[in-house]
Amino acid sequence: MAEELFSGAQVLVYVAREVSFGTARKIGGGQMNVCRTMSETITPAEERTVRPDRSGSPDHLARFVGRKSATFEITKLIMPTGNVTAEPDDTFLWENAFGRLSLGATSFSYVMATAHNTSLTIRRGIRTGGGAGVAEYQDHLSGAIVNGLEIAWGNQGEAGLARVNFRGMAKDWGWTGNTTLSGGIATSTKATCTVSSARQLSPNSCFQIKQHTQGGSGFLISAVNYTNNQITFTSSTLNNTFSKNDVVKAYNPTATTSGAPLHARLGFLSLNNSTAQIKHLGGRITFEDNRTLLNEEVGSAAATRAYRNDRRNVTFSLEFLVKKDEMGRLFSQMHRNTAENIQVNIGDEANKTIKIKMKNAEWDMVAPQLAGQDMMRISMAGRALGTAGNDSLWVRFL
């Protein structure tokens, strides 16, 4: 096991909505959705700064430890499930970014909310390259919020497929590796146990012992004593008898993900709810929610809650081939700074389409580009503004 490597081809991301900020969730029991991703980064941080006082030495002699935090970024394809009553696998990420999920009989929408402060537990499971179950790794975030996303499609997407990028910050980070029990457990129930190397585990680790997963949820660690190699469980008991050297490893269950990607060959763009469709090459919408985590109060080693510290920003860029029939419309609206209702549909099948709408969008001043002997193009950018509040952008699956 010591020589096992972990392959990026064998990654799953698990996301759950937390009941209270920073209280980590297990994987199973309907708590978590499983996402296929294209890439993701999880970056922990902790303030470790040299002491500012003088020591009588020309060298720094010590650092102090401050607060903890983390950031993350997840990039994946947009994949409707094919059923308007079934949310996509990444629904918790969408909902946390916008603030509210609105359910309808024939569609559902992600809608902006004024001051939502919900948080997520995010876990990334990676299996060894030697085969599923040989060794497992998992890192996790608790108290995570999505405070930015980017939607891209067409020539701005991924090989013509629509994709979404979620990014945000979190209260804390941890990891789960592979170790063994250092002694047998004969009692029928037990809330603690000793392992051969507690350094393989951290608070909020979700793990299994041999094939036992506590009914498919995994065991959740509340505390780790690295001195005596003892781990403590959160609302968990070991209801089986285990022996010395039984394997303790990250719990990364396999799961069936749903949905199919959206290709740019299906879809259209329209202005002001017109039935006339404007041909375009692709586009990109960037949403910055400007929520953050409160991580400055005295008496806390990490963030204590999420809150809004500024107004949100929605910007966009749409790329066109310049055509004589459309040039006047686009250039005139841009020049006069006239707001428009922009609607983009990606997909055209029932239950397999998303509609993106910016109801009060203003164009920036840009110029067409002519590169060599290629056709004239223009990348028209702008900003989506609100009208009645919480309506500068919404995304509907229908």
Image (spheres, rainbow, N blue to C red):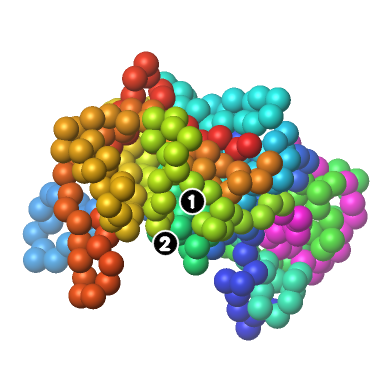
User: In front here: 121 or 103?
Assistant: 103
Query: Residue furthest toward the front?
Result: 325
Q: Position of residue 368 (x, y in %)?
A: 20, 56
Query: Residue furthest toward the top?
Result: 388
| Quarter of image, res 287 | top left
User: In front here: 153 or 65?
Assistant: 153
Q: Which residue is mark 1?
A: 164
Q: Which residue is pictured at 76% across the width and 70% down the height? A: 133
Q: Position of residue 23 (x, y in %)?
A: 58, 35
Q: Which residue is mark 2?
A: 155
Q: Secondary structure at mark 2?
A: loop
User: What amino acid type should be assigned to the residue bearing mark 1?
Assistant: Val
Label 2: how many Cα within 10 Å (few below 14, some 14–19, many 20+): some
Q: Which residues are magenta?
A: 228-257
Q: In which quadrant of the rendered image does the C terminus lie?
A: top right
Image position of 363 (left or right of 307) = left
| Quarter of image, res 234 | top right
